[in-house]
Amino acid sequence: MREDETGEQPVRVFTGSRIEPLDGTRPEAFAVRGERVAATGSRAELADRFPAVERVDLDGALVVPGFNDAHCHTSQAALARVRVDVSDARTADEVLAALRARAALVPPGEWVVGQGLHEDALSGRVDRDLLDRASAEHPVVVIQYTFHRAVANTAALERIGYRTEADAPSGGQLLTTADGRLDGWMYERAWLDPWLPGSGRESIAPGGEPSAQLAALREVNTELHRLGITSYCDAIVTPLEQEMYAAAHRLGQLTPRVSMLLWHSYFDPRAWPAEQPDAHRLQLAGVKLMLDGALSGGTCLCRQPYPSATGGDNGLQVLDDAGFQRTVRSVHAAGARVAVHANGDLAISKVLDVLESLVHPPSGERINHRLEHCSITDEGLIERIRAAGATPVPFGAFVAHFGEAIERFYGAERAAMACAHKSMLDAGIAVAGSSDFPIIPIDPLPAIRSMVTRRTAGGGVLGPDQRLSVTDALGVYTHGSAHATGEGRVKGRLAAGQSADFTVLDTDLAAVDPQEITSARVTSTWVGGSCVWSAGS
């Protein structure tokens, strides 16, 4: 925005049918100078305070702070568009054909990578033998849609160094055929440990063109803006994804505000930035670790036994206790935030054991370390989370998508407290909103409906005591998520001094039946007072 003759950026006054700033006030208008909200109040007050300025009447029924997804994998959604997307495949032969087509474009010896596999929905099996038929000259790996497992061909297994089941690292698993031969399937650390450090060597598009990556990222970000999203936190980045975001920012193509969680394998306390000049647009918000498995996949690490998808009576512990403690303490000592994937109540307790042992400086602000997913809790754990000053980042829409599976795995009592947003908020904890996209769609409105109704796909209600009001659900997806990345003072509410990030909806969410929340449509999305998406454009 151009400056006026005094050297100050000009002010614009925005009005709308109803403005919900989520700070307890009910303004009729708000003024924006540069990228920040300068003031809120009545139309008359702001007309008196800012005469002869541009006035923008927002076309919609409700204006809210911009939606903020605190745990998603947007870079992976973008990379899927330049990898081999097999998410729509319905047969193993379709997967094979797509991989063969890509292998024909890639020089021998380079990786061929598929992503988005729904193996349970396929007719036919995707395994090592099938991927060997795709190519014997390329290492081929296909990443399952939850990112908790992947399948590889013989060349990929040899490149990684896997020959027998015993080669799996602690916290990982390699599946075998009846005769003991590796069948290509790798679970948790068995694929994450060798793959993430290798992703910088991956030829993810023919020729590995970075322009293809950036175009895909722009495309995904535009789709997120269409859903009202102004900020998000990418929950795993390596140097590959970090550079993709940095390049988009340098080129002026990064329209949302992006925070990143660096995978712990890359954490170097000597290299962690003390200051990030462009942090309000692109920042490293913390270091990501994984302690257990998946909620919907039935591999959470729990205190009490359950029929786990591992084939045993409990889920997976991905990192051993000693190594986990060392990493958390190292990150904390460097002044950085840890963000620990912990779904089950035992995993959450193990994280809290370490957080409670950390030494905090006598002066200065405490770091709010994060509990990613924080799915299976009870009142005792919630009190420990509050006392530790940690920020839980539960799934927003998983009850709606996977409620029946959650109850089947963990039983009715534990399932009723799954994603316990209400209990956490009642305890005075700032709670963030998250999708885990692209595992499920990122649209915030179904997540808000899920938090308000707790209704499952089968029509039941899972834990009715955990239902939120619409206002509280909006707060989770705005200022709650901002708190999770250390930005609660600068965004998440439409208040003076905060970022002018906001979303305009054609429906007042509080005025409709909760089941109708998803009928609302975004009419425009604004970041820093600039429109980044409009239904009319």
Image: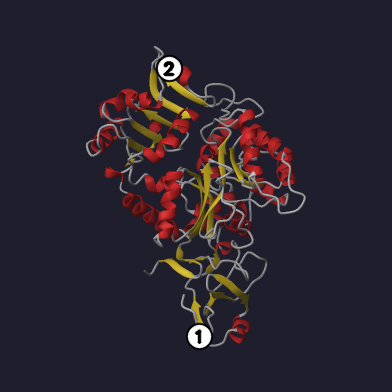
- Are the residues at dot 1 and dot 2 in contact (C-beta closer than 8 Å)? no
Q: Secondary structure at mark 1?
A: loop
Q: Mark 1: which amino acid?
A: Glu
Q: Nearer the viewer, residue 467 or 394?
A: 394
| Colour scheme of the picture | secondary structure
Q: Which residue corresponds to mark 2?
A: 164
Q: Nearer the viewer, residue 271 or 394?
A: 271
- Of the numbered discs 1 and 2, the one sitting upstream in the chain is 1
Q: Secondary structure at mark 2?
A: loop
Q: Nearer the viewer, residue 76 or 86?
A: 76
Residue lying furthest top: 179
State the image coordinates of residue 30 (x, y, percent, origin top left): 58, 75
Q: Is residue 23 left or right of residue 529?
A: right
Q: Which residue corresponds to mark 1?
A: 5
Q: Is residue 428 visible?
A: yes
* Disc 1 packing (10 Å; few <14; some 14–19; many ≥20): few
Residue lying furthest front: 270
- Judge whether 19 appears above or below 458 on screen: below
- Judge whether 379 appears above or below 535 on screen: above
- Judge whether 457 appears above or below 66 on screen: above
- Name which quarter of the figure residue 293 lies in: top right
- Name which quarter of the figure residue 357 lies in: top right
- Name which quarter of the figure residue 22 lies in: bottom right
Q: Mark 2: which amino acid?
A: Thr
Q: Is residue 407 left or right of residue 383?
A: left
- Judge whether 269 appears above or below 276 on screen: above
Residue lying furthest left: 104
* Mark-to-mark CA distance, 1 and 2: 72 Å
State the image coordinates of residue 535 (x, y, percent, origin top left): 40, 66
- Image depth: mark 1 or mark 2 in front: 1
Specify the quadrant that holds the C terminus: bottom left
